[in-house]
Image (tube, rainbow, N blue to C red):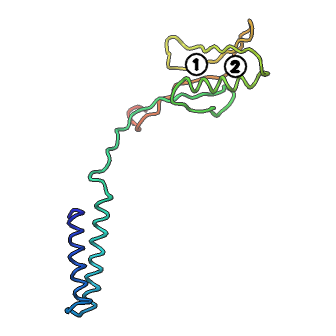
């Protein structure tokens, strides 16, 4: 039954309930039972109005690449980001906090040319001196599902 049909049935039952309770039918118990049934149909009509016609489509799961900002001497990452720029910005901000305000820092990221999506390492240059910081950004693929064949 659709929402409008539930509403029509509720209205019909309410009319009958009124007749049996207050009219010449004169049976309050039957009137109460019909009123309760009408409430049920009214509730079904409300549910039919609120419920979507079809369940929402669930997108197919797929692998996602995230970028992990980390320090080489810490077991925990600084953070995980949706793009490498955000992960690099986090590393650069941490390194900036290690130096006095006003120090001119120039950041240089080195990437393995053979694997551009691998580990990027942050160096900082102050004047003519370049120092490795120990901060890295690594592309990490989060698989959508477990593949037992991948372990073999």
**Residue farthest toward the right in the current orientation of the protein:** 100
110 is higher (above) or lower (below) than 73: above
Q: Residue at x 31, y 69 (%)?
A: 43
Earlier in the chain: of badge 1 and badge 2, it is 1
Distance (Cα) linking label 1 and label 2: 12 Å
Quarter assignment of residue 3: bottom left
Tell me the element at label 2.
Answer: strand
Quadrant (top left, top right, bottom left, bottom right) of the N terminus:
bottom left
Q: Which residue is mark 1?
A: 120
Q: Is residue 37 left or right of residue 81?
A: left
Q: Which residue is mark 2?
A: 133
Quarter assignment of residue 34: bottom left
**Residue farthest toward the front in the current orientation of the protein:** 23
- Give the x, y percent position of residue 111: 56, 14
Q: Residue at x 55, y 24 (%)?
A: 138
Tell me the element at label 1.
Answer: strand
How dense is the environment of label 2, judged by Cα within 10 Å: few (below 14), some, or many (20 and up)?
Answer: some
- Give the x, y percent position of residue 68: 57, 29
């Amino acid at each position: 039954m659709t929402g409008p049909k539930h509403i029509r049935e509720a209205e019909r039952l309410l009319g009958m309930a009124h007749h049996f309770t207050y009219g010449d039918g004169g049976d309050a118990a039957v009137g109460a039972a019909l009123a309760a049934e009408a409430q049920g149909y009214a509730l079904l009509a409300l549910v039919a109005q609120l419920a979507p016609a079809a369940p929402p489509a669930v997108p197919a799961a797929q692998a996602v690449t995230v970028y992990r900002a980390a320090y080489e001497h810490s077991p925990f990452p600084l953070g995980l980001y949706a793009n490498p720029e955000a992960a690099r910005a986090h590393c650069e901000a941490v390194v900036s906090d290690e130096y006095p305000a006003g120090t001119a820092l120039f950041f240089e990221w080195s990437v393995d040319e053979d694997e551009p999506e691998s580990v990027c390492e942050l160096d900082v240059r102050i004047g003519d001196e370049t120092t490795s910081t120990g901060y890295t950004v690594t592309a990490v693929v989060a698989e959508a599902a477990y593949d037992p064949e991948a372990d073999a």
